[in-house]
Image (tube, rainbow, N blue to C red):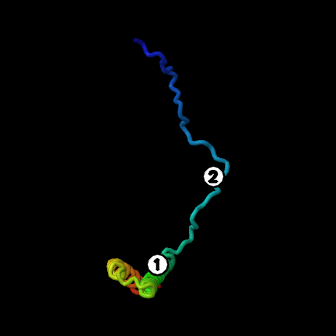
Amino acid sequence: MPDPDPVPETGQSYLPLTPPIVENEHFGIRPPSNINLEDHEARTGRFIAIALVIVLVVSIVSQYVALIILTIYHREDAVPSFEHLFNASFPVLAGLVGSAVTYYLTKKGK
């Protein structure tokens, strides 16, 4: 049985061979070409170190506030499970903060 829709053999393709011409091809978001990578890396390291220290401090303060609230409302039965949760998350945060601060303090060109 012959093919009902034969493709003509004209040598032409259905897809264009060249990309479409864009009139505004010089516009758009492009990174600046004069970035000083050492300064950018130092600023990023400082920002990450400060942000992780803030997260650690907020975590510790919120743990103490939650324990005070549980004590005020006489929910001492929930304290051991809450402390177990804090004891599991605190070493991870402390390790991240220690790594970030060490990287920031030992980086050349601060």
Q: What x and y, as percent, mark residue 83?
A: 34, 82
Cα separation, mark 1 vs mark 2, equals: 36 Å
Q: Give the quadrant of residue 82.
A: bottom left
Q: Is residue 66 visible?
A: yes
> What residue did someone put label 1 on?
48
Q: What x and y, as percent, mark residue 85?
A: 35, 77
Q: What x and y, as percent, mark residue 36?
A: 52, 75
Question: What residue is drawn where x is 42% and y is 13%?
Answer: 2
Amino acid at the residue labelled 2: Glu
Q: Quadrant of the N terminus?
A: top left
Which of pointers 1 and 2 indicates the residue nearer the eye?
1
Amino acid at the residue labelled 1: Ile
Q: Nearer the viewer, residue 56 or 87?
A: 87
Q: Nearer the viewer, residue 30 or 58?
A: 58
Give the SS element for disc 2. loop
The numbered dot on residue 25 is: 2
- In this view, the residue farthest toward the front is 74
**Mark 1 vs 2, N-terminal side:** 2
The numbered dot on residue 77 is: none
**Residue 20 placement, left or right of 67:** right
Give the mark count: 2
Task: Tell me whether circle 1 and circle 2 mark residues in contact (CB < 8 Å).
Answer: no
- In this view, the residue farthest toward the right is 23
Question: What residue is drawn where x is 58% and y is 62%?
Answer: 30
Q: Residues within 10 Å of mark 2 (few under 14, many from 20)?
A: few
Q: Residues within 10 Å of mark 1 (few under 14, many from 20)?
A: some
